Amino acid sequence: MTTVLLAEDDVGIAEPLSRALQREGHQVVVAGDGPDALQCATQDEVDLLVLDLGLPGMDGLDICRRVRKQRPELPVLMLTARTDEVDFVVGLDAGADDYVAKPFRLAELLARVRALLRRSVPDALEVGGVRMELSARRVLVDGAEVGLANKEFELLRVLLHRAGQVVSREEILREVWNDPELKTSKTLDMHVSWLRRKIGGQRIATVRGLGFRFNVG
Ligand code: CA
């Protein structure tokens, strides 16, 4: 699930927008002033910032510049009521990825949000001879396509995404099986062994007592 930080002090905008984003399947955090917005935006859980240009306590442009320094990868969609072009340019200068002028149509704003989130998620992962094409749901090992079952694909995605690091059993079970209580722990071991058979056993290391690691190179 993605988390959208909505920095907007006008409740008449924040409330309906927040509901619409939730209907799209996002978790929404609302910040009503500048300092609060800045503090929330620098948390890792936030995947997208919808930022009103006119916030109490700190200007939206200032927030955007500061957020950019700490989290250059975070997509920022600016909301502005100032319609002169200079503000737009300055807004994008400050590092916003896109902007919507108020009053906006909800459908248009949601389309921009979708586009920004799509852009921020890479569609292919490639590490150590293993390539995953996510939207095509294709896996290539040393250039040859390998057929993976659904859970094997998700498991590989989690490991590859954090290649070189240990991913704990708990994290894998939560992300792939949605089971933080470890009831499917044995199932995980079975899937790891199937996956090893398909992509090469040396690529996935067991880290005793912790979890698994996808070996880089
Ligand atoms: Ca405002």
Image (spheres, helix red, strand yellow):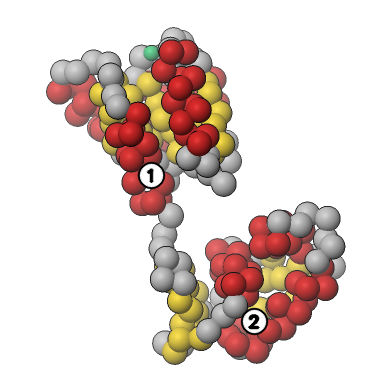
Q: Which residue is pictured at 52% across the width and 34% down the height?
A: 22
In the figure, residue 171 lies in which quadrant?
bottom right
Identity of the residue furthest to the top in this view: 56
Disc assigned to residue 195: 2
Task: Kindly report the distance in space between the C-alpha atoms of the residues bearing marks 2 and 1.
Answer: 32 Å
Question: For residue 94, what is the image quadrant?
Answer: top left
Badge 2 density bin: few <14, some 14–19, many ≥20, Cα 10 Å:
many
Tell me which residue sits at (57%, 46%) in the image.
1
**As displayed, is residue 174 above or below residue 157?**
above
Q: Could you say which is closer to the camera, residue 16 or residue 216?
A: 16
Is residue 107 depicted above or below 149 in this figure? Answer: above
Displayed quadrant of residue 72: top left
Question: If the picture is divided into quarters, which one holds ligand 1?
Answer: top left
Position of 65 with respect to 11 (left or right) is left
Specify whether residue 108 is in view: yes
Rendered image: mark on residue 114: 1
Please tell me whether residue 108 is drawn above or below residue 129 in the rendered image.
above
Q: Nearer the viewer, mark 2 or mark 1?
A: 1
- Looking at the image, residue 169 lies above or below residue 59: below
> In terms of sequence position, does the residue under pointer 2 or pointer 1 come before the other?
1
Mark 1 is surrounded, within 10 Å at the Cα level, by few (under 14), some (14 to 19) or many (20 or more) other residues, namely few
Q: On the picture, is 173 further left or further right than 41?
A: right
- Count the marks: how many? 2
Front-lying residue, 183 or 30: 183
At horizontal 34% and vertical 19% (from top left) the residue drawn is 53
Q: Secondary structure at mark 2?
A: helix
Q: What is the secondary structure assignment of the residue under circle 1?
A: helix
Q: Amino acid at mark 1?
A: Arg
**Mark 2 residue type:** Leu
State the image coordinates of residue 113 (x, y, percent, origin top left).
Answer: 38, 39
Of the numbered discs in the image, which one, if any, rests on residue 93?
Answer: none
Where residue 158 sits in the image (x, y, percent)?
60, 64
